Image: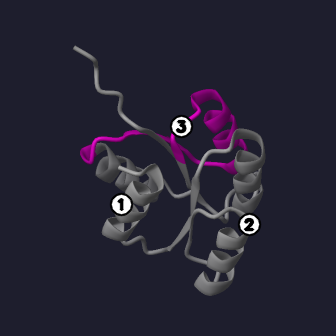
Amino acid sequence: MTEFKKMKIVVIDDEQEILDMLKDFLSDKGYNVITTLSGKKGFEVVKQELPDLVITDLLLPEQHGLDVLSQIKDELFIPVIAISGIYKKYEVNKYIQDRFGDGFIEKPINLEKLLKMIEDILNE
């Protein structure tokens, strides 16, 4: 009998409440979730863990989320969903879609919309 491998998601956000909410929600949906609080540390965790998907805030300490997103896409080719409560949705969404082809979710996060986006990206 083969063992079911949980899909791994790394979440990068500087708000512990957001990390806790996403970890609880996505873990309940069957994902293995790893969280981190900064851009620089987030990229290190992504390199070490090689997840199936990354969710990152854009306004992060130590390294901007767009820089983290760009590094992940350029070096590791892992899909990334950006989240932000600061940047205007249309501008950021268009930039991310044009440059990376993944997704953008505005804060406050609609968890069902996020889940649908994750499932679409991971083809589940």
Asked if the residue under mark 2 is in contact with the one under mark 1, i.e. CB atoms within 8 Å, the reply is no
Point out residue 104 in the picture as x, y percentages from the top left corner.
55, 70
10 Å neighbourhood of mark 1: few (<14), some, or many (≥20)? some
Q: Which residue is mark 2?
A: 99
Point out residue 63 in the picture as x, y percentages from the top left corner.
76, 53
Alpha carbons under labels 1 and 2: distance apart:
22 Å
Q: Hey, what amino acid is under mark 3?
A: Pro
Q: At 31% from the left edge and 48% from the top edge, which residue is drawn?
A: 24
Quick one: SS at disc 3?
loop
10 Å neighbourhood of mark 2: few (<14), some, or many (≥20)? few
**Membership of 18 in magenta stretch:** no
Q: At 62% from the left edge and 37% from the top edge, which residue is drawn?
A: 46
Q: Quadrant of the N terminus?
A: top left
**Membership of 49 in magenta stretch:** yes
Question: Where, by quadrant of the figure, is residue 102 drawn?
Answer: bottom right
Q: Which residue is mark 1?
A: 115
Question: Relative to residue 22, is residue 84 drawn left or right?
Answer: right
Which residues are the magenta region? Answer: 28-53
Point out residue 12 in the picture as x, y percentages from the top left corner.
57, 50
Alpha carbons under labels 3 and 2: distance apart:
20 Å
Quick one: SS at disc 1?
helix
